[in-house]
Image (spheres, rainbow, N blue to C red):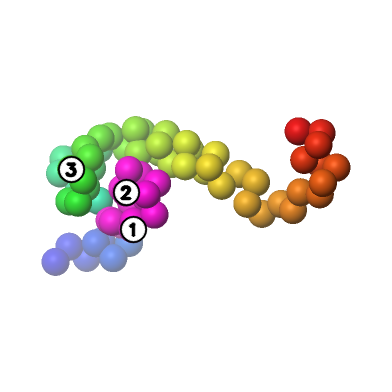
Amino acid sequence: MDPFEANRIKKRCPVCFSREIDVVMIVTAPEQHRCIKCSFEGSENEVFSMYADIRKKYHWMGRRLTMEDQVNL
């Protein structure tokens, strides 16, 4: 086993993660990642851009909105 394997950052599949399924992607080539569940394949930049889209979904989760805030939206 590679001694640096423990320090490698594991990435979650953004397609499965948006469906609230936690699947770790495997590295097929340098800068290419693939999901074993849904067969999503993409570069690291594509994965990070899809993570940014997922963050938009939970943007207001940590904030409590009052009735006045909802009317002003």
Q: Are marks 3 and 2 in contact (CB under 8 Å)?
A: no
Residue found at the very far right of the displayed protein: 68
**Residue 56 image offset from top left, x and y in percent:** 55, 39
Q: Is residue 19 toward the left or the right of residue 60 in the image?
A: left
SS of the residue at dot 2?
Answer: helix
Q: Can residue 20 be found in the magenta stretch?
A: yes
Q: Which quadrant does the C terminus fall into?
A: top right
Image disc number at residue 22? 1
| Residue at 33 percent of width and 58 percent of height | 22
Q: Earlier in the sequence, mark 3 or mark 2?
A: 2
Real-space Cα distance between discs 3 and 2?
Answer: 10 Å
Place residue 31 in its image quadrant: top left
Q: Is residue 9 shown to the viewer in this render?
A: no
Q: Are marks 2 and 1 in contact (CB under 8 Å)?
A: yes
Image disc number at residue 39? 3
Q: Alpha-carbon neighbours of circle 3 within 10 Å: few (<14), some, or many (≥20)? A: few
> Please, is residue 2 above or below residue 69 in the view?
below
Q: Which residues are magenta?
A: 8-24
> Please, is residue 54 above or below residue 26 in the view?
above
**Residue 2 image offset from top left, x and y in percent:** 17, 62
Q: Foreground: 68 or 6?
A: 68
SS of the residue at dot 3?
Answer: loop
Q: Which residue is mark 2?
A: 16
